Every structure is written in structure tokens, then in C-alpha cells.
Amino acid sequence: MIRPVGSRQMNVSRVAARFNHLFVQKHMKLFPTRLVFVVSFALLWSVGACWVSAQTSGVLREVYTGIAGTAVSDLTNSASFPNNPSTVEVLTTFEAPTDVDENYGQRLGAYLFPPATGNYLFWIASDDNSTLFLSTDDTPANKRVVASVPGWTSSREWGKYAEQQSAAISLIGGQRYYIEALMKEGGGGDNLAVRWQLPNATIEEPIPNGRLQVFGLGPPQITQQPTNITVVEGGSATFTVQLARAFGASFQWLRGGVNIPGATNSSYTLSPVAVSDNGAQFRCYISNAQGNTNSSTALLTVQADTTPPTLTSVANLGDNTIVTVLFSEPVEAASGTNRLNYSINNGISVNAASFGADNRSVVLKTSPMNPGVTYTLTVNNVRDRAATPNTVALNTQRTFTIDFAPLDISNLYPNREPIGPSSRRTGLVISEIMYHPTNRPDGKVLEFIELYNSQVFAEDISGYRLTGEISYVFPTNTTLSPGGYLVVAPVPADIQNVYGITGVLGGFTNRLSNGSGAIQLRNKAGAVLLEANYSGDPPWPVASDGAGHSLVLARPTYGEGNVEAWEASDVAGGTPGSGETPAANPYRSIVINEFLAHTDDPEVDYIELYNYSTQAVNLAGCILTDDPTTNRFVVPNVTIPARGFIVYNQTNMGFSLSAAGETIYLKNPSGTKVIDAVRFKGQQNGVATGRYPDGAPGFYRLVNKTPGGSNGRILVSDVVLNEIMFNPISGDKDDEFVELYNRGPASVNLAGWKLSDGISFTFPTNAIVPAGGYFVVANNAAHLMTNYTGLNTNNTLGNYGGSLANGSERIVLTMPDEVVSTNGSFLVTNIIHITMDEVAYRGGGRWGKSADGGGSSLELVDSHSNHRLASNWADSDESNKSAWTNVEYTGVLDNGNGTADSFQIFLQGAGECLVDNVEVFAQGGPNLVANPDFEAGFSGWFPQGTHDLSSWQTSGGFGGGKCLHIVASGRGDTGANRVRADLASALSPGTTVTLRAKVRWLKGNPEILLRLHGDWLEAYGNIVTARNLGTPGAPNSRLAANAGPAIHDVSHNPLTPAA
């Protein structure tokens, strides 16, 4: 009953019958006018089987990222569907954002309210596949397919396929129906929209907000209550509440019934905890548009700190006047930063003491220390922050040495470089990108892009543009000073308020994609000066994808387009408008080293940490979590020894890892820095993933689980990526292919396996690769089989989606696996995909040159090796495939300059070929080339410049004799880069002359030029005659049964070794 002001009553059911929509949460005036009802709670009533309250208009959008493929079934078979969306939001109409990401799926769900009774038509448009469902009522279980997109369409392209339009569907006006759209995006553009036609023939495109109500929110439902916590004074206490669905929920933590300012997340951390906090009670009030609830109350018990601080480590980070001291716990400012409490022997004076990154670390400024000398630091009178302070033991000492201490070569991460130009096209630099900031309770938008001017002069960038994910035109009179920074943001005021800076420009159109994207800087003419592509997936820094850190250009000499140029910012939030100087970090040597994420009882998930430094590190207060906004596990007061390990499993951490893939974060105690993070995809049951060797950058599947010990050998799949033709010399993408090889002892059924990332292909049920056999996946299978006699429908499939990039690309081979989980009282089986092999190739460098458009494929040398390393791949040997061919031209000598007295020959790029039987003669005259068949040696021939390595070859010529072997390191020209020979006599203008030679291509550039000095006459030829390049379906030409160890990532430090 609703009780009005006064004494009358009114039955809620009568009110409900008179309202089409769902809430009354304000003063409500009902007739008679003198009767005023004051309703201070949400009006609830039953509609069908569901209780609803204050329903929100719009469509619920759930996005599932990191899923390859273009079919809706790729989404529905994913382990993350339907219960673990990556992001959730409410759309105002039945249309999703356009061109926002790659390799994702989405579900749009809503209640639909027809305005009148009659027949309705529905359409769906999408890129890629999609399916539209409509229920016969408001129950999702009764949904049925009414329309679909079998391929892809442009945005709001409604008539491409017949399946896009539904049949006429009779609906009752005012009745609620459940409507749902599923869409899967592979690569390229992406869009999704639904429209309908009303009984009066009006088309609403897309279905508007007023016809829709968000499905599935409901009032908050708590799945995990906050628990009582006992903590030692000075530590931290974290209270957490979890909801079945957190989207749209607001949190407010209360202490003793009083709101805690700013405590508006699902977790609340009190740090440091004081003795006076003992007995405090905490609970959380949670609300959304559909209701509210209170958590249970948790009790905080605080034990007095009676343990004095100790010295955890003393280190020098390279500056011989700086010593960083790390205590086991926070220390008070008065004693901790008093330089008189520190002394160093050997005549070194301590001139100043200040706190470092936190109040556990103290930075001492000293007089200069000498390399190679061992020093002793003595500490006295330093107290902790307990209510009754504890003092460090009398004359506590630690020794340290100012010297170069080499680590394992695998532990040497690339050093940062000074900020500078990243391109030869401009001195401007895209120096920092905040593309996915952490959500803030105050709603401020902290996305930004930072530019830097590396030049010694100012540059006017008026009219320049930022394009790609966003669009922004720099206004008139915009000048970037030498060595200056400029920040552009969608909401400049938010950046200025939070960071305390001025001069931020903006706002720009659209927003930076949270998953991956591109940013270009264009000049006034529209030419691209800089292009930075970013991603949240490895090998990109994971900490920059929603964990609070920005991306900074740490190594500009790699170029802004190279992932190795970028790092996560040193601290959360980044440094917009200024350069970044990494601070002392006592946890810099701690990495997530190994984890196990897919287990069956009694085995448990675990995470292993490794300290690759030569000094112990105390981890007290550090945080392990799989959610950057929630402190799931706070590490107790524990020290990890030098080159030591520590392991936590799901039992003592309180959370398990997802077999389908997720992210693990290790954060510092204050939460201001992600120490390390690893993002992983689907995991094989019982198989651990770890760094190899310990502490190295790359993660691999491991042969054995080694928690608490050194990681063992890499687990190499029986089926491997074996050969890649990514840039055919023909320039025809139909000549591309990827070859698999089964190195195992038994046949392998590849049904459901996938090639993904750069290309997309799902293996059918009949795809079986025998032991020791090969399987080829082609861009155009029918075309490829015409070029290779060994290929047929039994060992060759296609066509794959997309195409292989000519510069660099990542190819991933995955195997399907089933994961069984519970959904309420039901068992649900989802399909995950486990990475069995991967390679990220590049053109040139250690990856070889000829595979990038020079006629070779990229071949794996030894299938037992680490397939990610460039030195384990090689250009295929094609030197015996192309036949001898004539290069010839006859013409009149005209329009020349100078004397036609010498013959010149050169390749148009790097490559090799054989040359024989060279001829230059006037019509009816003799050959003017001395030693034309090279039978007299190399006499009379002169290689120069890029062709200087060319030589005389004693065999292999046309007919088996001697010949010229041209070796070109780069393109030839009419200057000093060619092979030349003097003619017996000069040729006169107006003479009809023939240039002719026998040429056989070996590798590299296929175009050769024969010419006379003075530009009088030229003969050009493409000298590749073979179409069967590479070795698809056969053993690799560079195959080695047992290749030697690979040498990679070599660096030299220090620049000048110690004497």
C-alpha cells in the first residue's frame, strides 16, 4: 500500500495498471488535486516473471574482446561468453559504435515495446556476421532467429543479403518483448545496427531509445560479502564486496555508519592502519537504477606493532653520489630523513636524506664514491610509524659496492633512451599516449596524447591534424617550442585539474580505443608524418591497458611504429606535459615468472614471483590481483631472496585464474605502480606458462611445472608453423601460404584448430596431418596448387581470411579445448583456444632479406628450436629453380649524352644472378664485348659500389661453363653502382644496336638492366622464370636436424669495460 499525506490509502496494483513505465520516485500528484503522495522509495510491481524497478531506457551492450574469427559461433563458443564480458555499457539506440576494435564479439539485449498492435518488419546490418533474435514474450528462453547477416555489410546497409530482413511479425502494442543481437567482428571495419518498420509503414532507423528498456540489470546482488580482517598496525586492510553484475552499480563504504569520503569502489583499503582503528566496523551501501542493498558488516582488528624496522636492502642505481636504502616497513619522517642517522665508512659523507618512492625507501645524497670499493652503511635512531615507535637495532649495517654487477643476459631489458626524434620525416614526436585510463569515481576523462618537439627551433603546427582513432585539427597560431611538450585531450579541463598543468588543447572527435588503435600526425597537406599503433595485447605493455599507466616513447630510435619503442609509464597516471624520469623502485627486479591457470582438483592454480637481482627484496604490502581496481591479495611481510622465488596458490591468494585467459597484475603497496603484469589467452590443462630463462621478457608453455624453482625447457608443440610465404616476388597475394609440420610420432586431427591474428582460418573436421607430414593453408588454394606439383586437396586448404603483411606480422596457431564451468545449478561447456605456436616475423634484419619480396619463403630451420627467434628462421634457397632467360633489346642510338663506349649491367635492388654470353653489336657487326662468355676469367669486367661483391664463377654458366655472378647489396644506377666493361670501339649515334645477355636469377630483386654509357640504349628484363618458389608440402631447403643455439638480444654494458 502507498500511504498518502493524510489518512487515505491507495492500492499499488491500481496505480500500476495506470502506468506503462516503471517507476515513481518523486512527489506524485493524483486526483483529487488536494491529495499529494510523497513516495520516497522505488515503486515495484511484477511484470511477467520478473521484478523490475526504475528501468533504464536503452540497450545493454556486452563486449567480448580477444576472440578471433568472423562467425557468431566463434563468440558463443568462447569461454568468456556469456558471463565474462570485457566491457558493459548502455546504448541509447539499437546501434553499436562503429569501427572501434578488431577480433571481438558483442551482445545487445533489450526489452522492446511496440507502440501499436500489428505486423512489424525487422532488419539487421553488421560487419562481420550477426544474428537477430526476438522472443515471443519477455522471456529470453523463447527467443528465435528472425534475421541475420551471413557475411558483412557497411554501416546501415540493409539490403545486401535477403537474410537481413525478417518476415512480418505480429506484435501486441504495449506488450514487452525480449530482443537480442549477436555480432562477431574479425578484422577491418565493424558495425551493428537494427531497424524496424511499424504497422503504419514508418521505419525507425535504428530502433530509438523510447522503444527500448535495458535488459538484465536488476537490483544489486552480492556474491561475496566483506570479511573480518586482522592486521598489524602500519599495515593495510582491504574490504571487498563483489556483485553478480557490477555494471551500473554505485558503491559507498561506511565506517561506523558514516560515509567514508571518496570510498566509492567495490573495494576499500585503509592504509596505514593505526591502533586507534581497532574495533572499527565497515560496510558497503550499493545501489543502481533498479534498487539498493547493504553488505554485511566487517570488523577490523588491529594488533600493535612491536617489531622494529630492519634494513632490507642498500643499493646504488648507477649514480656514485646516490644510495637508496630500503627498510622493512614505513619509517617516520623525522628520524628517517635525518642525515645524521646514517654514516658510510671510507670517508664518505652523507649530505642529505629524503624519502624515495614511498616512506619505506630513503635516498641518501653522498660525497662521490669509487667503483669497485665495498662500503658499509651504518644506521641508528630510525623509528617506524607505530603509535609506540620501534627503533632500528643499534648500529644496523649493510655493505654495498659501487660496481658493474652483470646479470644473466636473459635479464637485460632494453635501456631507455633520451627523448628524441623517432622518424626522419619530422622532428616532432608522439611521446606519450594515455588510451585507457582507469575509471575514476568523479567521472573525469584522463585520455591524452602528448607531442614533443625534439628540434632546436620552434615549429608552427597550425592546421596540423591528429587522425586515426580520433580527429583533431590544431588551431591557428599553435607553436611548439624547442624541447617543449604539448598535450591534446578530449576534455582539456579534466587533464588540467587532475595534473595541475595548463595549455592543454582539445577536445578531439571520438575517443581512443581501449583495445588497440592508431594515431597519426599529419601536416597541413595531409601527409602522414608519424604513425603510432598501440595495443593492449602482448608484446605491448599490459599496464597501459586500464591499469592506470600511460604509454611512453622510451626508445625513439626504434621508430614510433615499433612496439619495442614503447613502455608503460614509470608511475600510474603518466606525466602529460613533461618528460618522464624513472624514480628509484625497490621492486624493479621482481617479475611474475610462472603461473598455472587451468587445473582440475586436487591441483591448484598458482603464481610464481622471481627476483632477478643480486639483493633480497621485501614484498610486504605488494598486491597480486587479476583486476587492477581490486586488491585481491595483499602479500604478507615476506622477503624474496636474491635470484629467489616465492609462490602463491589459489588457496592462500583467495582467487583462482581463468583458464580462458585474463591478466595478472603485481602492484606496489601504495597502488601507484604496476610492478609487472602478464596477459594470457587460453591455457592447456595442467600446463604451466613461464618466462624462459627465468626473468626473461618472453612467456612460453613449459615442459614441466616448477613452482619455486628455475623454469625448465620450452614445450614445443608437435604441430608447428614451419614455412611462411608472406611477400611473394610476383606481387600476387594469391601466392601467399602458411605451412604446418607435424614433428610428432602420430597423426594429428586439426579439426577446430585456428590460424589467427594476422590471418584467420579454422581447420575443418577432415584436416589431418600425418606424422612427419605437412599441411599448407593458402590465400588461394586452387591457385597455389597449380604452381606446386606436390600440393593437392589432401594437404592444402584455403582460403584464409585477410592477408599476410609484407613488413611484419604475427601468426598464431591455436588448438581448441573444452572448459566446464558451473552456471547456477547447470554445467556449461565452453570452447577455449590454446596457443600451440606463434611467430611474429619481420622483413629484413635477422629475419633475412629475400623472404620479404625477394623470392624466398621464410623457413623454420629446426622444428625443435624456439620459433619466436629470428635466428631460427632463414630465407629458403631458390638458387636452382629459375632457368636461363634472354634479356635483349634492339634499337636506334638516339637522345644520348656522351660516348657509347662501355657496357653496364646492374640489378634494380639487392639480389643475385648469373650472367653469360653478353653481346653488344651494331646491325651486321661483330660483338664489341671482350670476354663475353667469361671463359678468359674476369678480365675486362669491373664491379663497383653496391655491386662490388660480384665475382667470376668457374662453373654454372649457360651450357655449364664459366659466368659472372652478380651480387648486389642494393639497387644499381648509372653512376658508381654497377658492373661495367669497355667496348672494343665506340658506337655512333643513329646506329641500330642490339644488347643481349643470358641471365639466371638466384635470389632477391628480379629486375635487371643492360645499358650503354651515355643513356643511348637500354634492355630491361624480369629474370624470374619459376613459379614454384618456397617448399610448401615438402622438407624445408634450410632444414637442419639439430641446429646450434640461437644468439639473440645481444647488448653491451657498460660501454667501456672496467680495466
Image (spheres, rainbow, N blue to C red):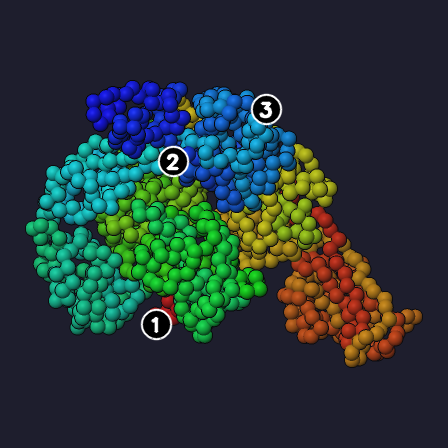
Specify few, some or many for label 2: CA neighbours under 10 Å numbering under 14, 14-19, or 20 or more.
many
Q: CA distance from mark 1 to mark 3?
A: 88 Å
Give the mark nearest the N terminus, 1 or 3.
3
Is disc 2 placed on a helix, strand or loop? loop
Give the mark nearest the N terminus, 1 or 2.
2
Of discs 3 and 2, which sits in the foreground?
3
Total number of numbered discs in the rendering: 3
* Residue at the disc numbered 2: 658
Of discs 1 and 2, which sits in the foreground?
2
Of discs 1 and 3, which sits in the foreground?
3
What residue is shown at x 45% (from left), y 32% (from top)?
A: 212
The residue type indicated by label 1 comes to Ala
In the image: residue 733, left or right of residue 109: right
- Seen from the viewer's position, the closer of residues 324 and 313 is 324
The image shows residue 738, relative to residue 968, as above or below, that is: above
Contact, CB < 8 Å: mark 3 with mark 2? no
Point out residue 232 in the picture as x, y percentages from the top left corner: 14, 44
Any part of residue 612 in sight: no
Point out residue 896 in the picture as x, y percentages from the top left corner: 80, 76
Image quarter in which the N terminus is found? top left
Q: CA distance from mark 1 to mark 2?
A: 52 Å
The residue type indicated by label 2 comes to Ser
Give the mark nearest the N terminus, 3 or 2.
3
Specify few, some or many for label 3: CA neighbours under 10 Å numbering under 14, 14-19, or 20 or more.
some
* Label number found at residue 1059: 1
Is disc 1 placed on a helix, strand or loop? loop
Point out residue 645 in the picture as x, y percentages from the top left corner: 29, 46
- Seen from the viewer's position, the closer of residues 476 and 510 is 476
Extreme-left residue of the structure: 388
Q: CA distance from mark 3 to mark 2?
A: 44 Å
* Residue at the disc numbered 3: 168
- Seen from the viewer's position, the closer of residues 16 and 702 is 16
